[in-house]
Image (cartoon, rainbow, N blue to C red):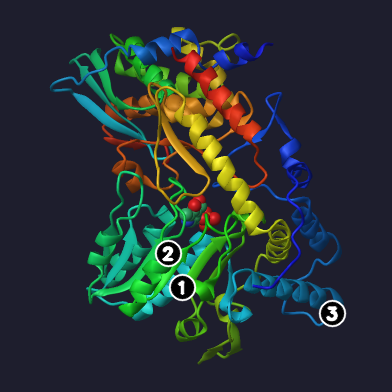
């Protein structure tokens, strides 16, 4: 494999593009759920906001904050894939995504509903960066479980 | 300081002394520019560790048997070496610790709890490593002392006038970094100590980043305490040094209780051992200490004059090379600076840069470098940092620059 192939396992166009133009990068007024995610090891810091209706469907989801390309792209892609999903589906996706980034779910072999999110499948090879990818998901999961401060370190 | 023959500065020969320098990373030769995190170890250190574990393995200060006596002699010889290395008056002023962090905590807990009281002020600077902030905060919580912080300017230099203004009759302790690990700033430590002493305030110097790069003379500086880690001095991890003036150490209670630090123990009353053992409870990192002795021998064989000259050259070369990269901003541009280059790039987060240059075999550090207040001062969440040692080359700096350009391409 050429060097560029291995590098772009992580920095693929989709990721770079979401980093450049993050989707749903804003604050929601009057969110039903929100949480702050913080990675003290690298200073990545973001807020995730959700607006969930009576039926438990995510009507709106957004994020803001600062972080590396991986954390920003991951947050952006998360908001895209969770919009319109139920809270149960969001929890399920969180679990799958978590397994994916630690190398415990193989998108070609294992059943999953990750869709485009499976682009992060190579990240387990970069242990220091796994936390960047999972940060927004932890914040989202915290928000829907009413935990408002989420750190990657506990 | 004891004289010792230094050998001519032969970079190729020196590089051969460090086995890790010939490791390849992701198919590329390693370019190790993370010396402020930890330095690589020369063969002589690795041999010393190996020899202890293979041929001399036993506990110290306990047995009458041959190996124990041999290990004890080696352990104490290392103390002598370090005592000479930093020009201490007595080798009993050298306390072996787990590292810089441990050494500072010992002073905060033992000296601080005994001699500081509610309302007393402890003065540090804005560029301290967390290990020279948090132990004092813990003490302040417990005793009601107040932590004061001297500011730094935009170049990352301590504002000495402000520092002096913060000193007042309530100031009872000063703890300050010699060389900043995030910025490379070299503080005017002698001037600070003289000023403090004129006000009868003891000073602890965090020499973690100074020790492998410049000669340290504790008597010349007249510091009251000085802390450093073996692993940043080309020695093993898990071992470090607390230097303290004899009278201060004698007046301080032990920081930990256990074996070795006692003279006699009964259930009614225990009496403590003399210096330095009073502060070395339990089995120490014996191999680490012996390895640290070997590291000191090695560094002295290179000589600080040679080290200083080469690192200065690297710093100038590296500064010029990095400044020429469009969109790159150096964080830390002090007049008086060690060979540490911290920087941020437009449009590339330090972590992404770290991962991308790693793909080229270049090891740098990215993050807040355990100096979060300093990052906040410069309004950056993190920086990328290349930190150089005497075995680094200009060619390696070229590799870093090339890797940065490659990363920029990915992000355009
Ligand atoms: C300036 C400074 N102080 C203290 C420390 C802490 O040293 P250690 O982690 O070896 O205890 C470091 C290490 O990064 C440092 O750079």
Which residue in the protein does label 3 denote? B65
Which residue in the protein does label 2 denote? B189
Q: Eyeballing the image, is B39 above or below B148?
A: above
Q: Nearer the viewer, residue B295 or B381?
A: B295
| Farthest left residue in view | A30
Residue at the image position 46 percent from the left and 73 percent from the top: B223
Q: Eyeballing the image, is A74 above or below B63?
A: above
Q: Kindly report the distance in space between the C-alpha atoms of the residues bearing marks 2 and 1.
A: 9 Å
Badge 2 element: helix
Residue at the image position 46 percent from the left and 49 percent from the top: B337
Q: Nearer the viewer, residue B34 or A117?
A: B34
Mark 3 or mark 2: whose residue is earlier in sequence = 3
Q: Eyeballing the image, is B376 above or below B161?
A: above
Badge 3 element: loop
> Residue B223's mark?
1
Mark 1 crowd level (few <14, some 14–19, many ≥20, 10 Å Cα): many
Which one is in front in this view, the residue at disc 3 or the one at disc 1?
A: 1
Mark 2 or mark 1: whose residue is earlier in sequence = 2
Residue at the image position 67 percent from the left and 44 percent from the top: B391
Mark 3 or mark 1: whose residue is earlier in sequence = 3
Question: Could you say which quadrant of the image residue B64 lies in?
Answer: bottom right
């Amino acid at each position: 494999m050429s060097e560029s192939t291995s590098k772009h396992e992580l920095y693929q166009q989709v990721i770079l593009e979401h980093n450049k133009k993050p989707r749903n990068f804003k604050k929601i007024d009057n969110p039903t759920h929100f949480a702050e995610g913080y990675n003290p090891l690298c200073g990545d810091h973001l807020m995730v906001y959700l607006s969930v209706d009576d039926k438990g469907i995510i009507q709106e989801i957004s994020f803001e904050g600062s972080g590396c390309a991986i954390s920003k792209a991951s947050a952006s892609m998360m908001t895209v894939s969770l919009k319109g999903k139920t809270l149960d589906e969001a929890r399920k996706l969180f679990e799958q995504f978590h397994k994916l980034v630690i190398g415990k779910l193989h998108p070609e072999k294992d059943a999953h509903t990750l869709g485009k999110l499976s682009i992060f499948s190579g990240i387990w090879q970069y242990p220091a960066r796994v936390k960047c990818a999972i940060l927004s998901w932890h914040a989202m999961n915290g928000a829907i479980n009413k935990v408002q401060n989420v750190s990657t370190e506990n | 300081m004891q004289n010792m023959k230094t050998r001519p500065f032969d970079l190729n020969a020196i590089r051969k002394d460090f086995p890790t320098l010939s490791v390849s990373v992701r198919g590329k030769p390693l370019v190790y520019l993370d010396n402020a995190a930890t330095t690589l170890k020369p063969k002589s250190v690795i041999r010393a560790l190996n020899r202890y574990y293979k041929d001399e393995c036993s506990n110290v200060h306990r047995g009458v048997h041959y190996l124990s006596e041999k290990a004890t002699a080696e352990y104490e010889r290392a103390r002598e070496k370090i005592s000479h290395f930093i020009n201490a008056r007595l080798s009993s002023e050298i306390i072996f610790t787990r590292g810089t962090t441990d050494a500072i905590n010992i002073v905060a807990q033992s000296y601080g709890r005994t001699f500081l009281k509610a309302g007393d002020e402890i003065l540090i600077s804005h560029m301290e490593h967390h290990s020279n902030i948090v132990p004092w905060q813990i003490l302040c919580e417990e005793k009601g002392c107040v932590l004061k912080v001297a500011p730094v300017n935009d170049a990352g230099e301590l504002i000495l006038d402000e520092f002096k203004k913060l000193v007042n009759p309530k100031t009872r302790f000063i703890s300050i970094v010699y060389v900043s690990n995030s910025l490379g700033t070299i503080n005017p430590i002698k001037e600070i100590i003289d000023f403090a002493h004129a006000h009868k305030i003891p000073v602890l110097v965090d020499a973690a980043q100074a020790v492998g790069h410049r000669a340290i003379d504790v008597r010349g500086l007249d510091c009251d305490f000085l802390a450093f880690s073996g692993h940043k001095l080309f020695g093993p991890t898990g071992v470090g040094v607390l230097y303290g003036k004899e009278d201060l150490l004698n007046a301080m209670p032990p920081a930990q209780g256990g074996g070795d630090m006692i003279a006699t123990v009964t259930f009614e009353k225990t009496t403590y051992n003399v210096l330095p053992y009073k502060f070395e409870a339990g089995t120490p990192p014996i191999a680490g200490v012996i390895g640290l002795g070997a590291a000191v021998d090695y560094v002295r064989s290179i000589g600080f004059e040679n080290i200083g000259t080469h690192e200065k050259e690297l710093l100038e070369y590296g500064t010029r090379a990095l400044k020429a990269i469009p969109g790159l901003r150096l964080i830390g541009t002090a007049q008086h600076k060690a060979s540490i280059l911290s920087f941020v790039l437009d449009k590339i987060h330090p972590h992404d840069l770290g991962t991308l240059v790693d793909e080229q075999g270049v090891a740098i550090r990215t993050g807040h470098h355990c100096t979060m207040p300093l990052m906040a001062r410069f309004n950056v969440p993190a920086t990328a940092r290349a930190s150089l040692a005497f075995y680094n080359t200009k060619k390696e700096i070229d590799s870093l620059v090339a890797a940065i350009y490659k990363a920029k391409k990915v992000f355009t």
